[in-house]
Amino acid sequence: MQFKTTTADAGKRSTACAIVGVYDKKQLSEAAREIDAASGGLISGLLDQGDLSTHLGASHLIGRVDGAKCRRVVVVGLGAKANFGRREFYKAAIAGLTAIKSSQVSEATFYLTAEDTVDCDAYYRGRLAAQALGEHRYRYADMKSRNKPTTPKLKTLTLAAAERGDSAELEQGASHGAGIVTGMNLTKDLGNTPANICHPTYLADTARKLAKRYAKLSVNVLDEPDMAALGMNSLLSVGFGSEQPSKLIHLDYRGGASDEPPVILVGKGITFDTGGISLKPGPAMDEMKYDMGGAASVLGCMAAVAAMKLPINLMVIVPSAENMPSGRATRPGDIVKSMSGITIEILNTDAEGRLILCDALTYAQQFKPAALIDVATLTGACVIALGHHRAGVMSNNDVLATEIIDAGERAVDRAWHLPLDQEYTDQLKSNFADFANIGGREGGAITAGAFLSQFTKKANWAHIDIAGVAWRGGAKKGSSGRPVPLLVDYLLTKHC
Ligand code: BES
Ligand code: MN
Ligand code: ZN
């Protein structure tokens, strides 16, 4: 992907494709007006005829524009001008590129970045435009032997600036956006790779490759004996039923001052979740290949940070296991002693994410993080609570929770704050151990967070449940790359 900027008149600029917007009430954007004027009223004529929709997200490709210098024009509906904000911008950007998804253009001029957005600046417009191009170009084709989906030809986007002063901001945004896309692509590839290939050792190899590529990045992978020596019996219990050895991956990026405490991201890396002996029902079980979405997103975030050379210290810790039933698998009722010393009665082997995370969170706290954030496809209950639109955020610090949620708003990768009151922890009582690993159906996303909170008392900690947002279902089935934009925004805003 490559980005340039321009302030030229849209009617006079040579380009294979001009992407322009129209607002409700037939209100042309400036670029649309310029092309309209040069082409003898092409766009306004089509609007008057009722052939162009101004609804947000509508788009029309017009293959010939006599009079103007552009070979094609895509007219994107922007909706009501007074409502045109960052989310509308992002939606319109995706729609504009979708209109040319099967066209041969390799270069286009993107005029939507010259529009005013009510709640964001040129930097974010540049960033979101780059992200839209990343979404447009992404394909997962590794497993196709025929009819391989090909990457669209479009790779150079010239972003229009309303005034010359915006160009630097747009370019900075596009450059950060390209870094985010690098991270999201890794996250998507890992998520989409099936579990017979993407197992804990595969995740560890991916981390090793990242560490080789970037000088400031180093890696350490703990094997099962290493974890046993540290007392990570909760983590290890999850992989007992699997032929695949469990791993704990630890990446360390040193881009900041040596005495600056790191931010630590911990990602749930269950490469397949059958539920174990508490076996899941069959329908849609294939989707549990995405149960390493937390791991994929923190690895993607690390890739983005390293590619962008951000001046921060960042650690990524991935506990990884495969949750399978077998004669050696953990049974409901088994009790394990976690690394922290807390004992856990495993009443349901399908509540395995918290079992690997608790030991990883204990391990992480020895590095005295400035902030400790775990990301996990943790509960179906979070999907019931928030749907596929927002991730759930729980924290022992309201300031940190707000920082994360604000980052999600800015990055158009939204999240929502859920409470963590003592009553939720009370639901985790066990007759035999310190805690049970489940707290009943009620408030299931929160009791999972409450469980994790028992292991993070010494840290500035937050938990992001991404069960609803890590992948898309239906015809567009596949990893979403979320919440990489949120995580990178948090790091850029709070720590750079
Ligand atoms: N990986 C699942 C959570 C999940 C479910 C993610 C659906 C995405 C879609 C997790 O390990 C799990 O099985 N959670 C159980 C917890 C329950 C047993 C307390 C759940 O949500 O049903
Ligand atoms: Mn499970
Ligand atoms: Zn799971």
Image: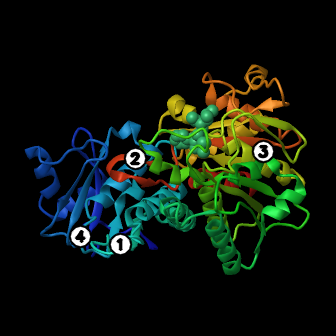
Q: How far apart are the alpha carbons under marks 4 and 2?
A: 26 Å
- Residue drawn 54% across the image and 58% down it: 123
Q: Foreground residue, 86 or 297?
A: 297
Mark 1, other Cα within 10 Å: few <14 / some 14–19 / many ≥20 = some
Residue at which label 2 appears: 473
Q: How far apart are the alpha carbons under marks 1 and 2?
A: 21 Å
Residues under numbered marks 1 and 3 in contact, where contact means CB atoms less than 8 Å apart: no
Does 375 appear above or below 188? above
Residue at which label 4 appears: 103
Report the mark closest to the observer, 3 or 4. 3
Mark 2 or mark 3, earlier in chain: 3
Residues under numbered marks 3 and 4 in contact, where contact means CB atoms less than 8 Å apart: no
Looking at the rendered structure, the secondary structure element under dot 2 is loop
Looking at the rendered structure, the secondary structure element under dot 1 is loop
User: Residue extending furthest left?
Assistant: 49
Residue at which label 1 appears: 151
Residue 365 x, y percent position in the rendering = 86, 50
Report the mark closest to the observer, 4 or 2. 2
- Residue drawn 68% across the image and 48% down it: 329
Residue type marked 3: Cys
Mark 3 or mark 4, earlier in chain: 4
Displayed quadrant of residue 451: top right
Q: What is the image's colouring?
A: rainbow
